[in-house]
């Protein structure tokens, strides 16, 4: 039944395209913005591989912080970004670029059940530190040197972390770094059995590499579960319908994504992408064609 329905819809859409003189696909490279976060790097390079090798389009990857990505999409300097955390974390960025008319449009869900938080290594006694509230203890602050290890300053997680410090009345310094800098600091601390609190998010390969736990957030300042979406410039679909439809179908199970991210850390993102495509041919085929077996 699904096969017949898909064929009928395809025939109908083709007929409408011919009747209305639908535009041909653009030949310009697809410019995809990305940030140096482990999940963003894997998902972006996976999309680039599929677009290049299955759709025959050139791809240009544009690495920048998250806030400039929204601006780049809105102004047309970037075609697509694949790391929009909704509905809370990136809502301010989206509201700003769409404040005087829609310039960035939602292509669809990439994965769900993502979350933000502050995490600590499991060897830190839970009876001493189980909640963000516990960071107020003098002994805990001393062990942590009054520091929360963060990521790039433009990230929504950093904005929420600053709000969390204020809401809980914490006398802590939020150190800006990068995703790689944060995990390097975490690795050093764990190798030395030192105390550390890091700004964290799921999915992330570090939860597969280390024994970590999130701190409870009774005030809810770091939010709840989020969804990650693809956003594109307002005219992107009209000029690139095949690419846009492929991205709109590109959903990944969270467990698959975390496993692939860990593989990337053990080797390279390019190898992890190639392995994922080889291991999931039916899923990739659906992304490209929309056909269900």
Image (tube, grey):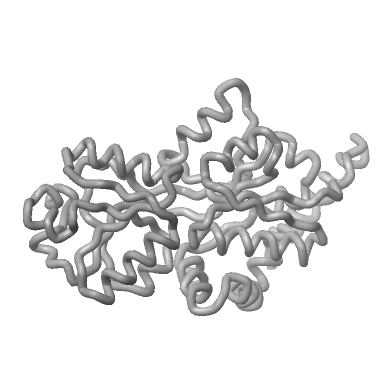
Which residue is nearer to you in this view: 26 or 290? 26
| Relative image position of residue 98 (x, y in whole percent) | 58, 28
| Relative image position of residue 283 (x, y in whole percent) | 63, 67
**In the picture shown, does residue 101 fall above or below 139?**
above
Q: Residue shown at 64%/39% (left/top)?
A: 73
| Relative image position of residue 255 (x, y in whole percent) | 45, 68
| Position of residue 159 in the picture relative to residue 101 (left or right) | left
| Relative image position of residue 20 (x, y in whole percent) | 90, 34
Of the 4 image quadrants, the one containing the N terminus is bottom right
Q: Quadrant of residue 114?
A: bottom left
| Position of residue 228 in the picture relative to residue 75 (left or right) | left
Q: Residue shown at 19%/52% (left/top)?
A: 146
Of the 4 image quadrants, the one containing the C terminus is bottom right
Q: Residue shown at 30%/57% (left/top)?
A: 198
| Position of residue 147 in the picture relative to residue 201 (left or right) | left
Which residue is nearer to you in this view: 286 or 29? 29
Can you see residue 1?
no
Q: Residue shown at 8%/62% (left/top)?
A: 127
| Position of residue 281 in the picture relative to residue 151 (left or right) | right
**In the picture shown, does residue 221 fall above or below 272?**
above
Task: Count the labels in the image.
Answer: 0
Can you see residue 256?
yes
Which residue is nearer to you in this view: 56 or 252? 56
């Amino acid at each position: 039944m699904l096969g017949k329905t898909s064929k009928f819809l395809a025939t109908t859409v083709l007929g409408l395209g011919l009747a209305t003189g639908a535009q041909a696909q653009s030949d310009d490279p697809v410019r995809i913005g990305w940030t140096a976060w482990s999940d963003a790097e894997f998902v972006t390079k996976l999309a680039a591989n599929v677009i290049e090798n299955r759709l025959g389009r050139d791809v240009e990857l544009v690495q920048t912080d998250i806030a400039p990505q929204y601006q780049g999409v809105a102004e047309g300097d970037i075609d697509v970004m694949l790391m929009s955390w909704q509905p809370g974390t990136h809502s301010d960025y989206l509201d700003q670029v769409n404040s005087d008319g829609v310039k960035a449009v939602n292509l669809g869900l990439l994965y769900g059940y993502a979350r933000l938080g502050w995490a600590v290594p499991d060897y830190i006694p839970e009876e001493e530190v189980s909640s963000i509230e516990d960071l107020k203890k003098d002994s805990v602050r001393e062990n942590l040197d009054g520091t929360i290890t963060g990521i790039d300053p433009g990230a929504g997680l950093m904005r929420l972390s600053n709000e969390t410090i204020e809401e809980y009345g914490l006398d802590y310094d939020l150190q800006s770094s990068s995703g790689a800098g944060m995990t390097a600091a975490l690795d050093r601390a764990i190798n030395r059995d030192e105390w550390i609190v890091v700004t964290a998010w799921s999915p992330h390969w570090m939860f597969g590499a280390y024994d970590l736990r999130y701190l409870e957030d009774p005030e809810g300042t770091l939010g709840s579960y989020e969804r990650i979406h693809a956003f594109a410039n307002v005219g992107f679909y009209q000029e690139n319908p095949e690419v846009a439809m492929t991205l709109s179908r590109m959903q990944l199970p969270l467990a698959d994504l975390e496993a692939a991210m860990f593989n990337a850390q053990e080797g390279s993102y390019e190898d992890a992408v190639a392995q994922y495509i080889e291991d999931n041919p039916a899923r990739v085929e659906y992304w490209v064609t929309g056909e269900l077996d």
